Image (cartoon, rainbow, N blue to C red):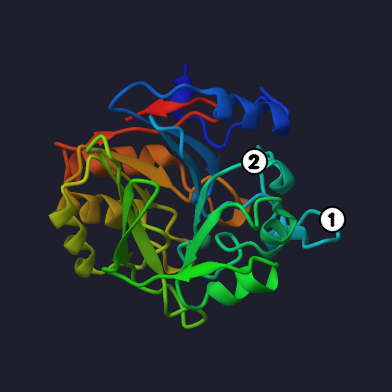
Amino acid sequence: MIPEEVIFPKEVNIKYTSKEFMEHIERFSVPINKVAMWTLGQNSWILKNEEGTIIAIDPYLTDYCGSKRTGVPTVKSRILPIFIEPEDLKVDIVLITHSHPDHADPYTLERLTIKDSAYFAAPFQAVPILKKAGIKDVKLVHPLEQWEWKGIKITGTFAEPTDFTDLNHMGFVLHFACGKKYYNSGDTAKTELLEHVNSFDIDWMSICINGGYHNLTHWEAAEITALINPKIAIPAHFDMMPHNIQPPTMFRKSLSMKAPNVQYYRLEYYEPSLF
Ligand SMILES: [Fe+2]
């Protein structure tokens, strides 16, 4: 009998409607000294701190990369449901790691209803995509730039470009008021420069593992995780498009060999995880 957790990909059971899921996140009470996190697939995440501030990273909430506006599925069409429709996304902060459409999705961004209320930050090549989508105020950010918003210290981190269409990839470190520190790798090719994140003393991180389009493979992701040395590592960017998926158990195995002191953790769809 194959253990349930290694079956991949597996159809996601719809638990909530889009509005219900967003309401669940808005109502969710984060315990003291904790940060809650939800996955929306690919590198799309929602985080919420105990003060109630909600952050979205790289919300990919359409099928832009697959069917564009045709609705006709292709090999790049998402295999995950759209957990939250763009109109329903109610967050305070939106961070974008780079301009590729599975991260800065023009169709998601143009449908947001929080364009004037949320705080948006993105690197150089992603900014025009947000502006074109009608988001007037976008903070331009850079690797190693540090700033603070709503009590969260945010640092841009370096990421190695995966092709020449975007030479301004980034990741982010979020340092919450409770002291916890989270690192999001964004999309990155392999480079030992990622070791610079080690100096932030990361509690938990998510890292791309799919290997496609020059992203880190699960093996390279484990090697980079060993350099960064967080307490917990979460696989990212492995579950969205059929031509570009990777069983996360491969990363779990690689991590056990390359970074045995780092705990592997995979988020369940719809479920809050506390860090
Ligand atoms: Fe990507």
The C terminus lies in quadrant? top left
In the depicted structure, whether residue 178 falls above or below residue 118: above
Which mark is first along the chain, 2 or 1? 1
Residue at the outermost top position: 1
| Place of residue 105 in the rendered image (x, y in percent of width and height, measured from the top left) | 64, 62
Badge 2: residue crowd in 10 Å (few <14, some 14–19, many ≥20): some
The residue that disc 2 covers is 80
Taking depth in this image into account, of 86 and 131 the one nearest to the observer is 131
Badge 1 amino acid: Val
Q: CA distance from mark 1 to mark 2?
A: 15 Å
Instruction: Write down the quadrant of residue 144 in the picture.
Output: bottom left
| Place of residue 119 in the rendered image (x, y in percent of width and height, measured from the top left) | 52, 56
Badge 2 amino acid: Leu
Badge 1: residue crowd in 10 Å (few <14, some 14–19, many ≥20): few
Which secondary structure, mark 2? loop
Please state if 209 lies on the left or on the right of 153 as rendered: right
What residue do we see at 58% from left, 63% from top? Answer: 104
Query: How many numbered marks are there?
Result: 2
Please say if the residues under marks 1 and 2 sit with CB atoms less than 8 Å apart.
no
What residue do we see at 54% from left, 30% from top? Answer: 269
| Place of residue 176 in the rendered image (x, y in percent of width and height, measured from the top left) | 30, 42
The residue that disc 1 covers is 72
Taking depth in this image into account, of 116 and 43 the one nearest to the observer is 116
> Is residue 39 visible to us here?
yes
